Amino acid sequence: MPSPEVFYLHIQGEQRGPYTVPQIDHLLNTGLIAEETLYWCEGLDQWAPVVSLVPKRVEKKSLGKILAALVAVAALGLAGAFVGPVLLDGWREASQHKYTAKAAYWRAREVVRNHSVPAGALVNFSRFSNSAVALRTPRAAAVELHGELIDDAGKTISMIWHVDMQFDEQRAEWSGAPAAETPAP
């Protein structure tokens, strides 16, 4: 292993350094150098991308912004008994970034809302405990959601939705194929 002080960077047409790996990590992950920046050290035949030396960390979505929006809505008096739970469910559906059964359940609800509910209709999902989530490898889940579909005429139909979900570990995101739906017995 070479000495920790023998890494050089190619920045704006110039060779700069020497740098240590922690220094390069800081430069990359604070945005001071681009992912396309090249590095070289003794023993390398040619310059290589800096991301092959240190990983680019992915920014986590800011919960602070989401919480600030919720506080603003509450301050305006719009988060009453009806709106508050709806906002909370929407936040839960949109902000699941872990490979867990509950996260797959919440994101599957969003898939159903966005791809399986006809225009003008509403859906009322059963609780997590009434659903079935089977985590599968590699990083997938089969989710069975129970609930009621209320069409634009007010007719209520008990439904079961089956959603196949995939988890992208690098982006920390769930995505799902459109749901298969069947009326509940």
Image: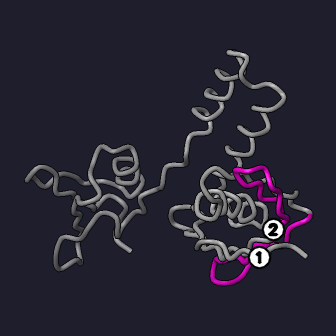
Quarter of the figure with the N terminus: bottom left
Q: Nearer the viewer, residue 175 or 86?
A: 86
Mark 1: few, some, or many residues within 10 Å (few <14, many ≥20)? Answer: few
Q: Residue at x 22, y 67 (%)?
A: 40
Please identify the quarter of the rendering in which residue 80 is found: top right
Query: Which residue is most to the bottom?
Result: 137
Q: Position of residue 100 (x, y in %)?
A: 74, 66
Asked if marks 1 and 2 touch (Cβ < 8 Å), the reply is: yes
Q: Residue at x 66, y 31 (%)?
A: 67
34 in relation to 184, above or below: above
Q: Nearer the viewer, residue 156 or 79?
A: 156
Please identify the quarter of the rendering in which residue 97 is found: bottom right
Q: Residue at x 71, y 22 (%)?
A: 78
Quarter of the figure with the C terminus: bottom right
Q: Which residues are magenta?
A: 130-158
34 in relation to 67, above or below: below
Q: Secondary structure at mark 2?
A: strand
Q: Main secondary structure of the magenta part?
A: strand
Q: Nearer the viewer, residue 184 or 64?
A: 184
Amino acid beneath label 1: Thr
Q: Which mark is residue 182?
A: 1
Q: How many callouts does the rendering have? A: 2
Instruction: Say whether residue 55 is left or right of residue 109.
Output: left
Q: Which residue is identified by label 2? A: 159
Amino acid beneath label 2: Met
